[in-house]
Every structure is written in C-alpha cells, then in structure tokens.
C-alpha cells in the first residue's frame, strides 16, 4: 500500500491545526477582554476625570498588543483620546470628563470587535442654581430684582461666575456680584436685576436663562419675563454740575437704595404691588451750570424755592408728572433757608443724601430710609397723624416720621398702605422677597 498520501494528509491536518491555533491566539475574545474604570463617579466640573481602560485578550486570556481600540460614550461628556492602540500589556486607556451632570455609559471595541463589557458612570453636579421669583413682569423701561441661589455641596475648586445666556437686546441681567470667590459649601444668595429697555415688547413673554459656572460646569435657572404695556414709573436723575464729577459709589448706592425700597414696599403691601422702577434705575445728567447757580438763580420769584425750582428745571423733572415720579439727586449743599424734600411727585435730595447712599455720611440704610420717606411724600403721603404737633398717639417709628432712621426696621401705617394700594406707581410687579443688606455697597 502506498502510504505517502496518508502521511501528506496527516501533515496537512497538523499544519491546519497549527494555523488555527495561531489564528485563535491572535483573535480578540470579546468575553475575555475587559473594560474597567478608575472610579464610578466624578464631579461634573469639566476637569475631574475618570480613566477607562481596555485590556484586549484572546480566548486563552493572553494580552494582545498593538490592537486598535475605540471608546464610545452615551450621555454627557467627552472621551480623550477616543481611540488608540494596546501596549505590550494589552491595555489602552482614555480619560472621560464632563461639564454637565448625568449618567454615562461607556463601550469599546478592539479591532472592530465590540466588547461585551460596559461601564456605567455618573458625573455629579458640582452646584445647582434656582432663581425666585421664577416669573417677573416688565413694562418698557422698567426693572425688578430676583434672588438667585447657588447651592454648593462642597467648596468649589474655582470662582462661581454668574451671567445670562443669549439675551435679546431689549433685556439686561445684572447680578450684584458677577464673580464669587472662595465660597464655602452651602447656599449663596445673590440679588440679580432684570431690566427691560424702552424698546422692549408690550405683550407676550420670553425666558431668560441665568447661568452659574464653576470652571467648565454650568447650572442654569430660567426666569420668565412677561411683558406689559407702558405704565407710570419711578425715575431717578443724578444731576452733576460742571464743578462736580460722577461718584461711582454714589451712583451704585442710588440704584441699590431704590432696589431695596422696591423689595421693602412689596413686603409692606403684601399684595404683589410695589414701586415700578425705571430702567436704567439712575440716569446721569451733566448740567451746564456750576454748584452755586442752584441757590442763586432767581427762578420762580421766591428765594426760599430757588434751589427746588432750579434743580427740577435743570433735571427735567416736573411736579405732578402723570407718567413719572422723579427722584433728583444733586451733589450740592442747599442753603438752610432753601429746603429740600419730597412733594408733588418729586423728591430733591442734596449733597448729604448723595454722600449718604455712597456710604460717606453715616449708615447707608438710614439714607435708604430717607429716600423712602421723601418718596412717600412725593407719592402723596403726609406725616402720620399727630406727629407734626407732637401729640400722643403719633406713630413715631413709622417710615413717614422717624422710622427712616431705623430703616429697614420700620413700617407703613394702615392709612398709608391703603393710599399706596391704589397708586398707579405701585402696580403688581413680582420682586424677590429677600432683602439684601442695605448697610453695604458690596452686599449681594
């Protein structure tokens, strides 16, 4: 018998078996290969990373080097590098980061072979943001204040930044503090002004998105702005003579005083009504006259009223304007025989008040209360009954008597609340219920 064909066949079988074993040794086994992570969760701050590692193995569990690896994510985040090659140990790694909170599923393939293993990871919010009230009402050229609360489960690694996203040209969002440094864990409240320009709509609504960012991580809180037709407003003029300069602290203090009063009046009335403040809150007007002119120019014929009439005419702030109640701040000291104050839809606030709201003339809250007192007169409120005559029963610590000196720890009387409750200058306007500290120009 010729045995050569049998030996040839046996040799071929051995060769085929050897080739098969070599192929199996090189083939990626999707069950024996692994996908692991350095952690199951990380802060969603855009910086903290979870390292994921593929170990490519064959059916015998031996590592495979030089293999092409691809990583894929389902959920928020980014993987870098998204692909690579295994080293001598059969491993290839990548890092996953996310600036948004949420669950992430990681999968991988080696040489196009999908691994059975999956990783379920979580990126945890570094902070949260909420603003109240969540809906405000604005007429053209008016403003209100909301409080945005940043919640920090742990001290942030970097400063918190507050801003608005994608604002239309007719809206402004102005945090009292745009950058918050070195914050501890817990809740941080920040007053935020929201204003509509004179060109804003008079109906409909749109959403403002306030954003708090810590590094690359962002938390968003929506505030709905409902538009209303034009309405009477409280307007303020900072009138600057030729021999004076704008004091930035005074300018900031004037706005803060009125925003604080808007919140305070709302808390007193308790009906949703409050002062409808103009936007911008303060209008700077540069006069063509020097300081001496206001008390000396013979306007109106009565020397006792020269300061009044000259200041109001220069500011363009008439008495009994049906559309506006005017506050006029003038950094000039009035003579003793030429009084200032509030009446007939106008307040006139001289040098002491300008310095007061700037923190240069005693407690700032007292001068905020002083503005509230004179504004009450401009709105038609008299002193409480019996107070001018020093009679028993005078409500001494009401805002409209001596309560301005203890502001904000003061009150409006029942009669004053009734009168203001029908004033067109105090419509229903949502505003924050939280009062920021009126004692400091830096509080928020």
Image (cartoon, helix red, strand yellow):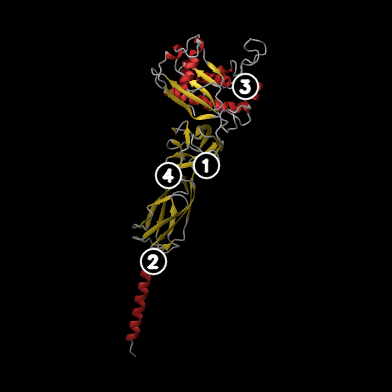
Cα–Cα gap, marks 3 and 2: 85 Å
Element at badge 3? loop
- Which of the numbered marks, if any, corresponds to residue 46? 4
Residue, x 65% and y 15% (percent of image)? 385
In the rendered structure, are the residues bearing label 4 and label 1 in contact, judged by CB atoms less than 8 Å apart? no
Q: Position of residue 224 (x, y in %)?
A: 54, 40
- Which of the numbered marks, if any, corresponds to residue 83? none
Q: Position of residue 333 (x, y in %)?
A: 46, 13
Cα–Cα gap, marks 4 and 1: 26 Å
For discs 3 and 2, the disc positioned in front in the rendered view: 3
Residue located beneath label 3 in the image: 412
Quick check: 122 above or below 301?
below
Compare residues 4 and 106 and report the one nearer the observer: 106
Residue 282 as seen in the image, left or right of residue 27: right
Q: Position of residue 195 (x, y in %)?
A: 50, 34
Quick check: 384 above or below 117?
above
For discs 2 and 4, the disc positioned in front in the rendered view: 4
Q: Residues within 10 Å of mark 1 (few under 14, many from 20)?
A: some
Residue located beneath label 1 in the image: 207
Q: Residue furthest bottom?
A: 1
Compare residues 372 and 115 and report the one nearer the observer: 372
Q: Earlier in the sequence, mark 2 or mark 1?
A: 2
In the rendered structure, are the residues bearing label 2 and label 1 in contact, judged by CB atoms less than 8 Å apart? no
Q: Position of residue 274 (x, y in %)?
A: 58, 29
Residue located beneath label 2 in the image: 27
Q: Quadrant of residue 225?
A: top right
Q: Earlier in the sequence, mark 3 or mark 4?
A: 4
Q: Earlier in the sequence, mark 3 or mark 1?
A: 1
């Amino acid at each position: 018998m010729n045995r050569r064909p049998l030996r040839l066949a046996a040799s071929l079988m051995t060769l085929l078996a050897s080739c098969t074993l070599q192929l199996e040794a090189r083939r990626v086994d999707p069950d024996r290969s692994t996908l692991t992570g350095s952690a199951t969760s990380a802060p969603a701050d855009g910086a903290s990373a979870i390292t994921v590692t593929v170990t490519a193995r064959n059916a015998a569990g031996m590592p495979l080097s030089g293999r092409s690896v691809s990583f894929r994510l389902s959920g928020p985040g980014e993987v870098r590098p998204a692909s690579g090659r295994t080293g001598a140990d059969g491993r290839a790694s990548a890092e996953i980061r996310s600036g948004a909170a949420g669950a992430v599923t990681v999968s991988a393939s080696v040489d196009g072979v999908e691994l059975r293993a999956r990783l379920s990871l979580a990126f945890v919010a570094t902070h949260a943001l909420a603003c109240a009230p969540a809906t405000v009402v604005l007429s053209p050229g008016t403003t209100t204040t909301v409080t945005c609360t940043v919640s920090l489960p742990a001290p942030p690694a970097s400063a918190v930044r507050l801003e608005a996203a994608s604002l239309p040209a007719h809206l402004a969002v102005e945090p009292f503090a745009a950058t918050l440094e070195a914050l501890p864990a817990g809740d941080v409240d920040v007053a935020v002004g929201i204003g509509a320009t004179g060109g804003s709509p008079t109906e409909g609504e749109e959403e403002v998105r306030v954003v708090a960012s810590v590094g690359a991580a962002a938390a968003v809180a929506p505030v709905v702005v409902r538009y209303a037709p034009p309405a009477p407003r409280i307007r303020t003029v900072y009138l600057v003579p030729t021999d004076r300069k704008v004091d930035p602290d005074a300018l900031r203090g004037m706005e803060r005083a009125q925003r604080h009063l808007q919140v305070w009046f709302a808390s007193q009335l308790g009906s949703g009504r409050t002062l409808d403040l103009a936007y911008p809150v303060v209008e700077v007007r540069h006069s063509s006259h020097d300081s001496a002119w206001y008390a000396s120019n013979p306007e109106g014929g009565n020397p006792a009223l020269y300061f009044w009439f000259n200041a109001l005419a220069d500011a363009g702030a008439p008495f009994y304007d049906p559309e506006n109640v005017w506050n006029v701040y003038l950094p000039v000291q009035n003579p003793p025989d030429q009084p200032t104050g509030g009446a007939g839809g106008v307040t006139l606030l001289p040098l002491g008040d300008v310095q007061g709201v700037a923190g240069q003339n005693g407690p700032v809250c007292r001068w905020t209360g002083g503005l509230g007192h004179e504004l009450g007169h401009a709105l038609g409120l008299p002193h409480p009954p019996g107070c001018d005559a020093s009679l028993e029963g005078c409500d001494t610590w009401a805002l409209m008597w001596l309560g301005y000196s203890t502001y904000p720890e003061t009150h409006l009387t029942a009669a004053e609340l009734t009168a203001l409750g029908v004033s067109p200058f105090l419509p229903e306007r949502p505003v924050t219920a939280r009062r920021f500290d009126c004692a400091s120009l830096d509080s928020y």
